[in-house]
Amino acid sequence: MWKRRLLPLLIGVLVVLVLAGVRVIDPYPTQALREIAFDNFQRMAPREPAGAPIRIVDIDDESLQSMGQWPWPRDRMAELTYRLTELGAASIAFDVLFPEPDRLSLANMANEFAIASIEINADAESLPDYDELFADTLSVAPSVLGFGAIPTEGDPPAAAKTGFAVVGPDPTSHLPQLTGTVNSLPLLTEAAKGLGSISLAPGGDVSTIRRLPLLWTQNDALYPALTLESLRLAMQASTLVVFSDDSGSGEVQSVRVGSFEVPTDPDGAMWLYYHPSDPSLYVSAADVLGENYQNLASEIQGHIVLIGTSATGLLDIRGTPLGTSMPGVEIHAQALDQMISGTFLLRADWVNGLELLTFVILGLTMVLMLIWAGPVATVGVGGLAAIVIGGGTWIAFQQWGLLIDPTFPAGAALLVYTAMIFFRFLITDADKRMIRRAFGHYVAPSLLQKIEDSSENLKLGGEERDLSVLFLDIRNFTTLSEGLEPAELVHLLNKMFGALGACITEQYGTIDKFIGDAIMAFWNAPIDVEEHAYHACIASLNMRERLKKLNATDEFGLGQRQGKVKSISIGIGIASGKALVGNLGLESRFDYSCIGNTVNVASRVEDACKPVDYDIVISDSTRARVSNLAFLEAGSIALKGRTFREPIHILVGDTAYAESETFAKLQLAYAEALHALRNGGDAAPAIALCLDHVPTEDENLRRYFARLEHRREDFQYDVAATGQSARAAGAEDMQPASVSETLNPQPVLG
């Protein structure tokens, strides 16, 4: 008894240690789950706006409509800066870059005209240079320009405009490195009073902005973020104070700007705590440049003003943990609002240790509970622990702004439980394994494996999967059965179903059931089958050939009997699409089967074999997935119980036949026949030409063409009435293609 419990105990401890090691390494999946949990915290309790003196001058769609397309001439930017200074802005920070000379400057345009040998009636040197005008305005305004970090090597930024005082060890080894930057013109950068990074994340490719880097470094030099620099300038401070870890590691703990201290992560980044987008933050740039701009004095005076854009097409929209997107300039504004209000999210060093210790204790508890109390009691304890962990982390977030991860302790404990259940089942439940082995005699091996992988498969229910469904029916079965004794009929069916069923399983199909004189099968469940529609079609062709050989050698013994039926003939219908597949029935008795519209279509398509007079008919959905077999369009038929007509096709042959010269000639003749049928013409000559290209022994195809003239209505349907578009058969359709193709051109931004 102790030996049977010792091995699971050792295995459980090993699983706990392995998962603890995973948490120490902290790979991307654990990080992603943690961030999702923190995002949900913010969605459930977003921050309330603090009402700090911050404004966004927005280059919005209204501004572009009234002032012209972006980029604007620098004289307009100079006017915008001058007016904001006049209105009393405490600092003016630009969340835009000016990396190239203003091509709209009159001086630059005059030089370009001179290069192009175009005479102008003015001296280029006497014309105003808008860049110089903008620089002059920046030099007298409390202005902050930005630079953008890029992941490739490039130019370094200009020297920082602020001083830095570091309290503690050098923190530069922990800060994001500036490998390269995009800078504004040196003329403008030198004139501005402040300089900071506008980048929202190292690398610049983060879709959801959760943390904002406040400090950057290159060659041991420190650079501030745009937010820090704009706050410093507004407070008229000359220095930023960086506090690093006293233990000697150099990890950043906080940054002080005047009287404000901002706690950070070890890499100098601040966790962003968002409030819903606040329209009152925004002032349209068009209003500042308008005639009545002085009416904005109460909204601008004493405020930190950020200039950015929310205009459509300027590509400065970022995702947030709230599940919404907002302009990048508002993210800077929300960070400033946190700094001024002192509302922060914290993830202290001890939090990682707490999360790891919580998991180890919970994991070992579940191991012991499973061994001595069983799975039911363990589920109760684990569920209670998950509630406590979730509630505790939520309270810590709401009350103290602490970010504690509930996902790893709870999720990893669930993995421990799952692993222990598996090993307990494998080692100690021999009687259940015996039942499973006995059960294996009655189900397909693939289905048994699926059941073994998860106990959920023993319950009612299913999943939606993409399937190809096949129905096969024996033609003239009533007439056939009249001349046979019951025992003889059963022998015939067993022989035929055994031969045809093998064709299905050889092509990775699952036989759902035998329904009297019919077979139902499907592909792509319970195991994935690539190109399942193709395998269903190949299985159909193989069944046709196998039945042909059985009839030729009179394996069914019908040729020696007095009855009317001398051979077996079948009809096959195939459809592809979504269907619900799983265990269906009663709790005490159920079958692994599939239901849904695709199943109904396959059954109705099989019924269509009779009016079409062909043995293999497939739906348009299946034809669209198979490109290398020989198909012919068979019109659009009304299916019982369906509102719209269904485009159908007949499966004529395999890949070799599809690539043959004979089939190419048949397609050309068939195109003429279809044209006549659709346009009310005489199709008889074209049908006769088709028959010339059909082998005499192919009775199926000859019957199909013989009946074609009587099915004219099936080829004259209104496309809109079918609910879908059908392939027009013609000489131009020699290469297989998807039945219904829709082009969705992607918008081009420029």
Image: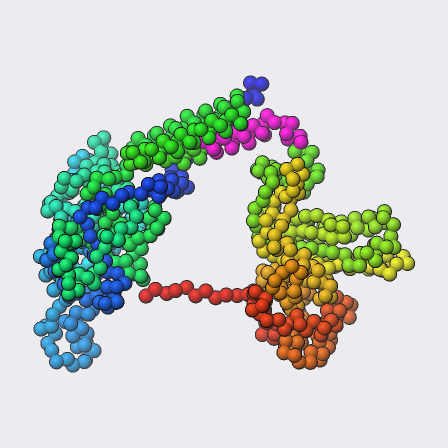
> Which color mode does the image show?
rainbow
Q: Position of residue 692 (x, y in %)?
A: 73, 75
Taking the image as shown, residue 471 lies to the left or right of residue 578, namely right
Evaluate whether residue 553 shows in this view: no
Pick the quarter of the image with the C terminus.
Answer: bottom left
Q: Position of residue 160 (x, y in %)?
A: 15, 49
Taking the image as shown, residue 485 lies to the left or right of residue 627, namely right
Q: Position of residue 63 (x, y in %)?
A: 24, 64
Magenta segment, which residues? 413-435
The residue furthest top is: 2
Taking the image as shown, residue 240 lies to the left or right of residue 523, namely left
Task: From the viewer's side, name the closer residue of 142 and 310.
Answer: 310
- The image quadrant that residue 389 belongs to is top left
When the figure is inspected, residue 499 is found, relative to residue 461, above or below; the finding is below
Instruction: Check residue 635 for magenta coloring.
Output: no
Main SS category, magenta section:
helix
Taking the image as shown, residue 124 lies to the left or right of residue 427, namely left
- The image quadrant that residue 410 belongs to is top left
Q: What residue is rendered at 15% in x and 50% in y? A: 303
Q: What residue is rendered at 76% in x and 50% in y? A: 516
Q: What residue is rendered at 65% in x and 51% in y? A: 522
Task: From the viewer's side, name the closer residue of 421 and 529.
Answer: 421
Evaluate whether residue 319 shows in this view: yes
Task: From the viewer's side, name the closer residue of 541 and 337.
Answer: 337
Number of dots carrying numbers: 0
Q: Position of residue 315 (x, y in %)?
A: 31, 59
Q: What residue is rendered at 49% in x and 28% in y? A: 380
Pick the quarter of the image with the N terminus.
Answer: top right
